[in-house]
Amino acid sequence: MFSLGECYRIETNLDREGQIKSHFYVIILKTEKDQIVMVNFDKTRGRSKYDRTVIIMPGECGDIITEESYINYNEAELIDIESFQTKVETGIIKFRGVIDTPILDRINNGVLRSKHTPFEIREIYEDKIYGSL
C-alpha cells in the first residue's frame, strides 16, 4: 500500500496570515502493527537553531526539496496506516514522489543519532535493531 521513501505534502497548521501551511513528510519505517513512521523536512533558511543530524541539499530529492533543509526528528510521527489512507483519499495528504534509497538510509541512520527524536520513535528503532540480536 505505502512504501518506504514515499514523500507526501501534509497540511500542518496556519501561518501568520491565516493561510494553511504544509510540510513534506517521508515514510521511513513500517511497523508490524499497521503503522508507519514519518519525518518531515524543514528549511534551514532563517533559523539559527535546528537539528543538524541530516541536512538535505536542493536536488538530492529530485524536485521535492528546493532549499537547504533538515530532517526535523522532533516532529517524527507514528501514524496508523488506515487513517493515513483516509487522508490521502480525501486529499488532505498529497503524494509528491519517492526519494532515493541512499537519502532514505541517511534519514534512518539519523533517527538514533538525533537528540531530538521522540522517545516513542527511538524505542521502535531500538527494538528493531537490538530486538533481532
Image: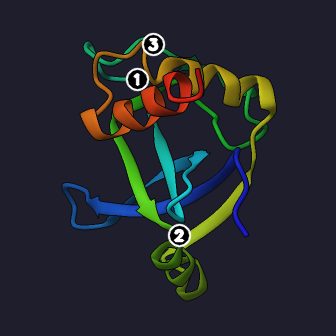
Residue 53 tag number: 3
Q: Type of residue at label 2?
A: Ile
Residue 57 percent across, percent down from the top left: 64, 20
Numbered mark located on residue 80 in the image: none
Tell me the tag on residue 81. 2
Residue occupying the point 49% across, 47% down: 38
Task: Work out whether mark 1 precedes mark 2 in sequence or the reverse, and give the earlier one.
Answer: 1
Q: Residue at image x 50%, y 18%? A: 110
Q: Residue furthest front?
A: 133
Callout 1–callout 3 Cβ contact below 8 Å: no
Marking on residue 45 = 1
- Mark 2 and mark 3: Cα distance apart in space: 27 Å
Cα separation, mark 1 vs mark 3, equals 16 Å
Residue 112 percent location from the top left of the image: 43, 19
Q: Amino acid at mark 1?
A: Arg
Q: N-terminal of the two: label 2 or label 3? A: 3
Q: Position of residue 21 (x, y in %)?
A: 36, 59
Q: Nearer the viewer, residue 114 or 8?
A: 114
125 and 10: which one is in front?
Answer: 125
Q: Which residue: 54% across, 52% down?
A: 31
Q: Are dots 1 and 2 in contact, CB under 8 Å?
A: no
